[in-house]
Image (cartoon, helix red, strand yellow):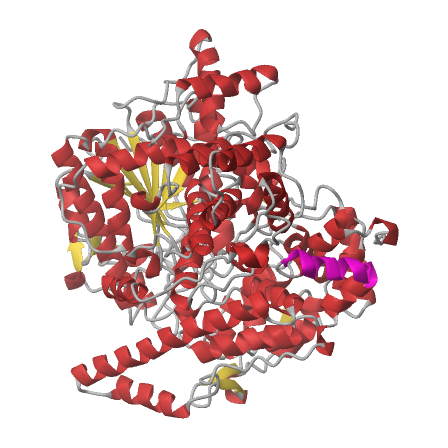
């Protein structure tokens, strides 16, 4: 009943479309990729072929809303900290001490265990020049790795796929959720998005219906491909208005092909692989649980993307941040336990980020307002464990408009991950050479 | 100058485009009626909705409820932890029920109300001001804001912005209710400039700090669930905003925003993008902004010019907009002449498809456009189409009903077992003549679903599917409709 997307139909497409013209953005991703891979094999490629079941994997974990870094990696011995936060400042007894200056929020026992086992690195004071306090703009900056005064449409993960993953399946990037993050926007978009593998399929009543569905979703090109395909993908204007280069229906046709192809793969894995750890019953826990299954099942994915929301703690921060950080640490800990049991822990690196930290001084509502620099976490067997960078000064004269100043550019972290973990040159992806932070 | 479409070019396809975009589309008969009116009268028919009575009653709970507020106060102050928990839980359940009713109350107005354009405009403003019940936690406030959009949505920009700023849901949503002279909260001050009226780069961080001080005093009377001005919270010293200095208050600040040349350009570009589905060129947007300014920053004259313009009917605009999930659902119900799914199912579908009404993902609202389409949402649309057409439950799981603990999702799944879907009645949408053979069936369904022909490959596939059936049953026709909706082409309008 289930018709595999066969090589024969792939060839058919190649004959009808790709070979007849130049590679167009409207060609389904995996077909275009198959074709360019054929070319890449002949060419002298400097990049590692980014497929295969043994390749390294990056899991990007977004902490959306702007996590309060100061109450996450806590400078508990710092007087400036306690003076700025008389109500919500965490006392020395409330932190899991890393050294005599800083400690982790007490809800993050799972992270402390990873830290003690040499599997967690804490990068302190990460940010970028001219920080922006808008959620959307700052998220966009993190997602696109652009300078704060430049609007870039494509995401850094998308540019990684463009540069380093010719010939990859659409499943080279997997987002668990309902929307593709801007980090994935690319010249030739790749990557699939779903939340529930059971429903990630076309439900047909009968083989004939299924057959017709497959034909109706094969290929329909209503307009010739644009000359320059760099503008022909998902794009975002400054005001957040999405636009397309080609006809909208061409983009959808392409997505329909990727859906058909990846649905078969994902469902097979989800049905076959069992989790080997207990996860929190949270959204993040569920997402990481699924990622562990897909890794265990050998999906040829290089980058997974999961997210946790709710960090915009303008009011009554104590309780909500406690819950969120506890969920984060417990979920990630369970994920590493699962990967260890699978024997895949050595292949996987988890990287967290949040669009900004928060103001040093608490506000009148038991919360904090949008700020700037904050810590990032990297988790894995091969991380350079411990505290990286140094804690930014909290002395009032060192603050900029009430915010701590960054001392590690997040793009140095990306560069480190790209070069040392994903084994690819970072400059073509990040636009210029950033000093790679040795995270692994 | 915005060039109008010549009346000679007005036809059924253009009327369909107008009804799809200014409203939610409709049956071939509805479109024909607009086509017969001619362009100007068709536009007037949609826009001058005040002439059409709308008897829809408001939800019976849509009024201030001091008793409820007293109960909540009591719960908060209670020393009895168990009593507190119970009372809070009870209130949450009531709110969940009300917001569910509210969603379908609105969807029903879109699907079968007499003023589709008014509802489309309300939907635009909901996405623009993007207020979520997840933070507001009050169905009455959400309803009130929705009514505000309905009441003022085609009127004056400055009046609308001020009223939205003083709207209880917004006062909670962007924390203005908590802003005080000694601790001004910057949230509303920032977003009103960045997201609602000017856009990034047209104000400074200093403007935000100063504007937040001007806005102090705008507050919420929680007991009576309405806006109140608190003079003692207002900062009466001078503020400098956009280079002007004075003892400004909130109303002054909004007036200063709307007076910025950028204000017209910002909102006209957003309106064009919503109705036309593209970002306007600078030249086109300058024309739109000029019309808006020339008409005292009122929306209705702008929209009348927009819907009559040749640019709105250009080939790169027509059938080149991705249907939003709400557009997809309401349009489907209208063209298939079937019923809206029961509230729980509509909610689950829209959540799965990424557009949970009254709960946009963040203050920026829904990104829209092709971001509606992912491999997952596309398959979900196809499967939800089957549910609508064949009258089955769509594939929903507990996780589709919120992530705040398992119980809500499990309760919803249990409630789903009692839910019945209507499905499509073939006799309602195909006349006996149209049912003569497979070609007339396919042609009639194409006309109804797409208002245009599909490609010859698609037509052939559908033909072959019907050919294989010896006796064409209603079920086969329903499957054909499902297949037509399971195409990339059905996802655009």
User: Is A202 rendered above or below residue B230?
Assistant: above
Q: Does the image show residue B11?
A: yes
Where, by quadrant of the figure, is residue B248 drawn? bottom right
Image quarter where the C terminus of chain A lies is top left
Let me know if residue B34 is in the magenta part: yes
Residue visible at 67% across and 76% down? B159
Q: Give the overall secondary structure of the magenta segment.
A: helix
Could you tell me residue A48's position as x and y percent?
Answer: 37, 18
Question: Measured along the vertical axis of the image, is residue B348 above or below residue B491?
Answer: below
Residue A439 sits in quarter: top left
Residue B253 appears anywhere in the view: no
Position of A99 compared to B471: left or right? left
Camera-nearest residue between B113 and B167: B113
Q: Is residue B361 left or right of residue A55?
A: right
* Coordinates of residue B105 in the picture (x, y in percent): 50, 73
- Classify residue A386 as left or right of residue B345: left
**Quadrant of res B392:** bottom left
Residue A12 lies in the magenta stretch:
no
| Quarter placement of the N terminus of chain A | top left
Closer to the camera in the image, B212 or A30: A30
Q: Nearer the viewer, residue B177 or A255?
A: A255
Q: Where in the figure is residue A347, as x and y percent of width and height?
A: 23, 29
Q: Residues in magenta?
A: B25-40
Q: In percent of the image, x 31 and y 35: which residue is there? A: A266
Q: Position of residue B18 (x, y in %)?
A: 71, 56
């Amino acid at each position: 009943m289930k018709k595999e997307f066969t090589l024969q139909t792939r060839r058919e497409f190649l004959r009808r479309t790709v070979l007849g013209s130049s590679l167009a953005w409207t060609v389904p991703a995996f077909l275009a990729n198959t074709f360019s891979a054929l070319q890449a094999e002949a060419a002298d490629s400097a990049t590692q072929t980014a497929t295969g079941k043994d390749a390294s994997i990056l899991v990007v974990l977004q902490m959306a809303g702007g996590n309060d870094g100061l109450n996450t990696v806590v400078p508990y011995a710092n007087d400036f900290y306690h003076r700025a936060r008389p109500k919500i400042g965490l006392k020395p007894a409330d932190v899991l001490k890393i050294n005599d200056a800083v400690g982790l929020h007490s809800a993050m026992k799972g992270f402390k265990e990873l830290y003690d086992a040499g599997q967690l690195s804490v990068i302190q004071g990460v940010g970028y020049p001219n920080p922006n306090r808008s959620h959307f703009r700052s998220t966009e900056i993190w997602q696109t790795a652009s300078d704060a005064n430049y609007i870039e449409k494509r995401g850094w993960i998308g540019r990684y796929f463009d540069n380093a993953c010719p010939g990859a399946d659409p499943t080279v990037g997997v987002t668990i959720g309902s929307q593709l993050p801007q980090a994935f926007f690319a010249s030739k978009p790749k990557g699939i998005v779903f939340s529930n593998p059971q429903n990630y399929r076309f439900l047909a009543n009968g083989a004939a219906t299924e057959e017709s569905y497959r034909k109706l979703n094969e290929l329909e090109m209503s307009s010739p491909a644009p000359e320059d395909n760099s503008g022909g993908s998902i794009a975002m204007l400054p005001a957040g208005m999405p636009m397309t280069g080609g006809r909208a229906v061409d983009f959808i046709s392409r997505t329909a092909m990727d859906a058909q192809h990846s649905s078969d793969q994902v469902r097979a894995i989800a049905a076959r692989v069992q989790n080997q750890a207990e996860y929190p019953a949270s959204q993040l826990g569920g997402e990481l649980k699924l990622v562990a299954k897909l890794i265990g099942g050998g999906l040829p994915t290089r980058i997974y993307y999961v997210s946790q929301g709710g960090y915009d703690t303008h009011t009554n921060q104590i309780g909500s941040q406690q819950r969120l950080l506890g969920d984060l640490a417990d979920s990630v800990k369970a994920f590493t336990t699962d990967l260890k049991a699978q024997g895949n822990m050595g292949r996987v690196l988890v990287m967290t980020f949040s669009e900004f930290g928060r103001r040093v001084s608490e506000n009148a509502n038991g919360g904090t307002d949008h700020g700037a620099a904050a810590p990032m976490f990297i988790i894995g067997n091969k991380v350079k464990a411990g505290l990286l960078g140094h804690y930014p000064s909290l002395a009032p004269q060192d603050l900029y408009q009430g915010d701590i100043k960054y001392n590690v550019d997040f793009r140095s972290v990306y560069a480190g991950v790209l070069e040392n973990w994903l084994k690819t040159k970072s400059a073509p992806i990040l636009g210029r050479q950033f000093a790679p932070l040795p995270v692994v | 100058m915005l060039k109008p479409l010549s009346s000679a070019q007005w036809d059924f396809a253009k009327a369909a485009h107008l009804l799809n975009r200014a409203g939610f589309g409709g049956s071939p008969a509805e479109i024909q009626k607009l086509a017969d009116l001619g362009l100007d009268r068709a536009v007037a028919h949609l826009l001058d909705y005040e002439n059409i009575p709308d008897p829809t009653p408001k939800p019976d709970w849509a009024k201030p409820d001091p008793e409820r507020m007293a109960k909540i106060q009591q719960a908060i102050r209670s020393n009895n932890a168990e009593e507190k928990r119970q009372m809070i839980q009870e209130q949450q359940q009531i709110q969940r029920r009300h917001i569910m009713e509210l969603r379908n109350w609105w969807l029903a107005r879109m699907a079968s109300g007499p003023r589709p354009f008014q509802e489309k405009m309300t939907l635009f403003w909901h996405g623009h001001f993007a207020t979520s019940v997840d933070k507001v936690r009050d169905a009455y406030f959400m309803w009130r804001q929705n009514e505000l959009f309905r009441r003022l949505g085609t009127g004056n920009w400055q009046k609308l912005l001020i009223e939205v700023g003083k709207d209880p849901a917004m006062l909670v949503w962007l924390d203005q209710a908590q802003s005080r002279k000694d601790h001004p909260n910057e949230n509303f001050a920032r977003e009103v400039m960045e997201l609602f009226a000017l856009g990034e780069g047209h104000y400074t961080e200093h403007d935000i700090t100063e504007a937040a001080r001007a806005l102090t005093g705008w507050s919420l009377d929680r007991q009576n669930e309405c806006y109140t001005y608190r003079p003692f919270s207002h900062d009466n010293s001078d503020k400098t905003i956009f280079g002007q200095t004075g003892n400004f208050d909130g109303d002054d600040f909004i007036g200063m925003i709307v007076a910025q040349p950028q204000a017209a350009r910002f909102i006209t570009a957003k309106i064009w993008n919503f109705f036309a589905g593209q970002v306007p060129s600078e030249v086109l947007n300058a024309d739109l902004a000029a019309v808006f300014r020339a008409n005292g920053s009122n929306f209705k004259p702008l929209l009348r010019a927009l819907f009559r313009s040749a640019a709105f009917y250009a080939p790169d605009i027509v059938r080149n907009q991705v249907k939003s999930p709400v557009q997809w659902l309401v349009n489907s119900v209208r063209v298939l002449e079937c019923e809206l799914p029961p509230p729980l199912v509509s909610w689950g579908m829209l959540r799965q498809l990424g557009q949970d009404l009254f709960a946009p993902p963040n203050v920026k609202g829904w990104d829209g456009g092709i971001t509606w389409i992912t491999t997952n949402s596309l398959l979900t649309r196809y499967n939800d189409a089957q549910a609508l057409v064949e009258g089955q439950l769509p594939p929903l799981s507990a996780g589709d009903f919120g992530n705040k603990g398992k119980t809500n999702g499990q309760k919803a799944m249990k409630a789903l077992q009692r839910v019945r879907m209507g499905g499509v009645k073939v006799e309602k949408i195909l006349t006996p003549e149209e049912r003569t053979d497979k070609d007339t069936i396919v042609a009639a369904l194409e006309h109804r679903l797409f208002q245009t022909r599909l490609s010859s490959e698609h037509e052939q596939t559908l033909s072959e599917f019907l050919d294989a059936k010896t006796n064409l049953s209603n079920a086969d026709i329903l499957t054909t409709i499902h297949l037509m909706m399971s195409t990339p082409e059905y996802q655009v309008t």
